[in-house]
Amino acid sequence: MTSTTLTPGAGDYFISLSATFEAANLDTHVVVSIYVNGVQVSGSERRTEIRKNRFDSCFSQALVTGVTAGQAIEGRFRSLDGDSITMTNRSLVVIEID
């Protein structure tokens, strides 16, 4: 799994994304980002080093305004070094703000 998704109604939202990762074969670097309607939220990209056979965490957050009904909010991750990584214990929290 390389993402986690929620689809709230229209509104303005505070978004929090956290996950734990494990690298299969090598020490590797992972990037996590928040996306709304398939577009990366500016400033939400975070990078961290994941050690082989060890669990490491990464966290990102964003304030997003103007989400319309039906637009998906998504947390995505990818390896920068091509190694296989596993995302576990993921959390995507979406809080509507006034």
Image (cartoon, helix red, strand yellow):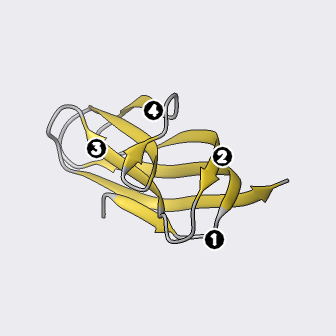
Distance, label 2 to label 1, CA atoms, is 12 Å
Of labels 3 and 2, the one closer to you: 2
Name the amino acid, label 2: Thr
Residue 65: image tag: 2
Instruction: State the count of labels.
Output: 4
Residue located 33% across and 36% down the image: 30
Rendered position, 36 above or below 70 = above
Marks 3 & 1, CB-CB < 8 Å contact: no
- Which residue was labeled with disc 1? 9
Name the amino acid, label 1: Gly
Tell which of 27 and 18 is nearer to you: 18
**Mark 3 or 1 closer to N-term?**
1
- Which residue was labeled with disc 3? 78
- Name the quarter where the N terminus is drawn: bottom left
In the image, farthest residue toward the right: 98
Residue located 56% across and 49% down the image: 18
Marks 3 & 2, CB-CB < 8 Å contact: no
Distance, label 3 to label 1, CA atoms, is 27 Å
Distance, label 3 to label 4, CA atoms, is 11 Å
Task: Count residues near mark 4 (Cα–Cα under 10 Å), then give few for <14, some for 14-19, many for 20+.
Answer: some
Rendered position, 51 above or below 85 = above
Q: Quadrant of residue 87?
A: bottom left
In the image, farthest residue toward the left: 82
Tell which of 90 and 60 is nearer to you: 60
Answer with left or right where residue 24 lies relative to residue 6: left
Of labels 2 and 4, the one closer to you: 2
Name the amino acid, label 3: Arg
Distance, label 4 to label 1, CA atoms, is 24 Å
Answer with left or right where residue 7 lies relative to residue 15: left
Residue located 42% across and 30% down the image: 48
Rendered position, 12 above or below 64 = below
Answer with left or right where residue 86 lies relative to residue 62: left
